[in-house]
Image (cartoon, rainbow, N blue to C red):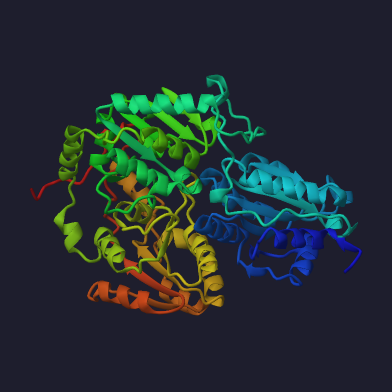
Amino acid sequence: MKNEMTGAEFIIDFLVKKGVHTISGIPGGANLPLYDALQRSPIRHVLARHEQGAGFIAQGMARATGEPGVCFASSGPGVTNLTTAIADAMMDSIPVLAITGQVPTSLIGTDAFQEVDAVGIMTPITKAAFMIRSVDELEERLEEAYHIMLDGRPGPVLVDVPKDIQFAKMPTAGRSFQAPSKPASFNRAPSNPTLSDSDIKTKDAEASLPSLPPTAAFQDKVEAIVAMLQESKRPLIYAGGGIVYAGATAELKSLIDTLQIPVALTLMGLSILPESHLLNLGMLGMHGSRSTNHAIEDADLILALGVRFDDRATGNVHTFAQNAKIVHIDIDASEIGKNRSVDIGLCADLKEALTALLHALNDQQKPLGQSSWLDRIELLRKEDYLPEEWLDNPFHPVALLRHLGEIAPADAIFTTDVGQHQMWAAQHLSLRGPRSFLTSGGAGTMGFGLPAAIGAALAYPERPVICITGDGSLFMNLAELSTAAELNLNIKVLVFNNNHLGLVRQQQDLFYQKNFFAIRYDRPTDYAMVARGMGFEARNIMHEQNVGEILEAALSENGPVLLNIPIDEEQHVLPMVPPGKANIQAITPVASAR
């Protein structure tokens, strides 16, 4: 055994001992020592075609598994190219460790070749960003980065390592590593229910929740929530991605089934419950169903679990659930009361909080969902309307996605890009369970879907991964088709191609007096030819062909396949809440056939 190792070797050894098995990235001059050490390790490296792709590949692995994703980039443009993927991870609470190269410490501040202030750029879009100043602080900083990434609400962390520190020697004796980290889903900070209202409404990025067992204050709040549930005549659960990240889907399902309370889901929470669950109202918000948004308006109590009360979910937040009392439980104290005042706020691990609620309710022996309330929900659902021409046209996105949901394997993982296709998928796909629907929520990043699919396929090579994208989104990270083909991953890419930026066109149609501008690709791209050139099996589907049969055949093939599917640019994804309006003011399909 060597008596000393380089800083780069230490970083790689640290990652090995943390259980990291795959790293995505791109080498450059400033991080070559890291790559020299990496090639002698058991960690697999995935060479992305762009640093943004590398970041989203790491995200795909993290979103699919709950374990941290790791990506490498060099200095300068390597860092700046990575920022979009890191900002996206921050918005959606995804644990990603980004390790970047930096110019030697002696050149920092001299405008050296490919020098940028990585920490300054990344600090606003990460939980923490560090530059390593000395090889002697490397172990402490890496442990700190890992802890911050997973502690409480997960999120991305940057470690920027100057090239001379990567080369610097350090002794191996006396080094100790923590055991490989558990998946983020199970690495949660316990609750701190003693925070005051002023604490809850103040965001402190440096603070982390202390590890405390449930206290009397915690139990008091749980009992107050139970009392509020007992008094309610029209309770409704509003659940989001925080449930998935906490590994609390089983507890939520038990709560729903025990109390017979309907649940509305955010985009990030859609995979929590099967679509077939009788109390699953589906997605709320801008593109949520009419019945779901009206149910929230009618509710007298909202139990908000792992959500942010963001504008896409609430519409005009001042009109959201005006008739309801609000209970908000979340791991992040800064989210409670930030966008919507609450009657009870509990900063807690959701798995822990829901378990406590279930214990407190154990003696009730009766469902709290009033039969009249459930009857009202059923009536609202019957008023939802889908035009028959949507369902009868096999090339309509609604019919396509419903058929896809029926024929996709039970263990399929879906990823989407951002645009109309994302919302159609959210509305109409039949999802398979937690972490089976990977999409960019808070940042809404076009170009997410393909590299995220690569990450999911790397994490679960035995499972089919289906990427639903649009022509506009696919362009954003088109080069990663080459990465997927090179790895021969079992990814199916479905391009919903209307030759437009469809959601922008829809807004110009509805809200800008049909002033269509800068939304059409005047020269159509042969995506099948491009994909074949990169190593995919690929087909352009024509309207006279049986799209259902072609889709089924593609899913049965092994390896990467791309289908280019023509979509009518005039199709709108509806319902849609106009900007600034309440959710119940959504534009809905016209029921002209009735």
- Give the x, y percent position of residue 191: 55, 34
Residue 551: quadrant of the picture: bottom left
| Above-or-below relation of 179 to 308 | below
Please report the residue visible at 82 percent of the width from the left and 52 percent of the height from the top.
Answer: 112
Residue found farthest to the left: 594
Q: Is residue 142 visible?
A: yes
Which residue is at the front of the view, 572 or 176?
A: 176
Is 373 displayed left or right of 165 in the figure? Answer: left
Quadrant in which the N terminus is drawn: bottom right
| Above-or-below relation of 233 to 141 | above
| Above-or-below relation of 276 to 524 | above
Please report the residue visible at 51 percent of the width from the left and 55 percent of the height from the top.
Answer: 63
Residue 46: quadrant of the picture: bottom right
Which residue is at the front of the view, 217 or 347?
A: 217
Please report the residue visible at 70 percent of the width from the left and 56 percent of the height from the top.
Answer: 179
- Give the x, y percent position of residue 401: 30, 61
Q: Is residue 526 visible?
A: no
- Give the x, y percent position of residue 224: 41, 24
Which residue is at the front of the view, 139 or 479?
A: 139
| Number of numbered discs | 0
- Give the x, y percent position of residue 593: 9, 50
Please report the residue visible at 24 percent of the width from the left and 75 percent of the height from the top.
Answer: 546
